[in-house]
Image (cartoon, rainbow, N blue to C red):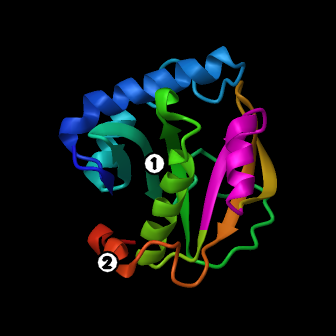
Amino acid sequence: MTDGFQPAAAEQTDALERVYRAAAAHMNEQGIFQWRATFPTRDHIVRDIAAGNLFVLARGGELAGAVAVNRSLEVAGADDADAEWNGALPFAALHRFCVSPRLQGQGFGRELLRSAEALAFGRGCRSLRLMVLETNRFALGLYAKTGFAARGQFPFEDYGTFLFMEKDIPFGGSLYPASLQSKLGSKP
């Protein structure tokens, strides 16, 4: 696996599934039940890869993290929920954001967010949106430090309350050069 931020490939499905399972277990051990033992499913991973929406961050030949980037909040009713969105349109939505538990605390979360931001900007988006469980203090801290602001709440089945968060993408995207943005494509 080449180091850097890149589209996920089908041959990475098993490695992605292992990282997501480890992340879910790690969150559950900390009392954060945003992802249950089976989320995200292998089907989520396969569909995200096939749609060109799943991206990985690799370091030292190892899968450090992953994120899906598309244009929907994906949860039934979430796109129509009462939220005070203030960001510029069009937006990109981040899903299944994950850093391998073994590699957390080393800046990979910030790097993954900056890379997703550059990708979204390259695809013509001017803001980022996401949903995060209100008890996921680690993710909330990272998102706040990188410029996301709360925009509303969404109660979801037996998971609890999710917060909608949003961030405008600065002109030109993140600190990543145009060469990275063009490499990742301009697909909406």
Which image quarter: residue 126? bottom right
Q: Quadrant of the C terminus?
A: bottom left
> Looking at the image, which residue is at 46% across and 57% down?
69
- Residue beneath the point at 34% across and 38% down: 63
Q: CA distance from mark 2 to mark 1?
A: 20 Å
Three-letter code for the amino acid on which mark 1 is drawn = Val
Residue 162 falls in image quadrant: top right
Foreground label between 2 and 1: 2
The residue nearer to you, when weighing 168 against 152, is 168
- Asked whether 53 or 154 is in front, the reply is 53
- Mark 2 and mark 1 lie on one chain; the one further toward the N terminus is 1
Q: Is residue 81 visible?
A: yes
As helix, strand or loop, the secondary structure at mark 1 comes to strand
Mark sitting on residue 179: 2
Q: Is residue 152 left or right of residue 114?
A: right
Q: Is residue 66 magenta?
A: no
Q: Is residue 31 left or right of residue 72?
A: right
The secondary structure type at the circle numbered 2 is helix
Q: Which residue shows up at 27% across the image and 27% down it?
A: 14
Q: Which three-letter amino acid code belongs to the residue tagged 2? A: Ser
Q: Is 124 on the left or on the right of 9, as rendered?
A: right
Magenta residues (range): 128-147
Residue in front for this viewpoint, 22 or 74: 22
Q: Which residue is mark 1?
A: 67
Is mark 2 in CB contact (under 8 Å) with mark 1? Answer: no
Using the rendered view, name the quadrant where residue 178 is placed: bottom left
Q: Which mark is residue 180?
A: none
* Above or below for 141 versus 179: above
- Residue 98: x and y in percent read 50, 39
Q: Residue at x 50, y 46 (%)?
A: 108
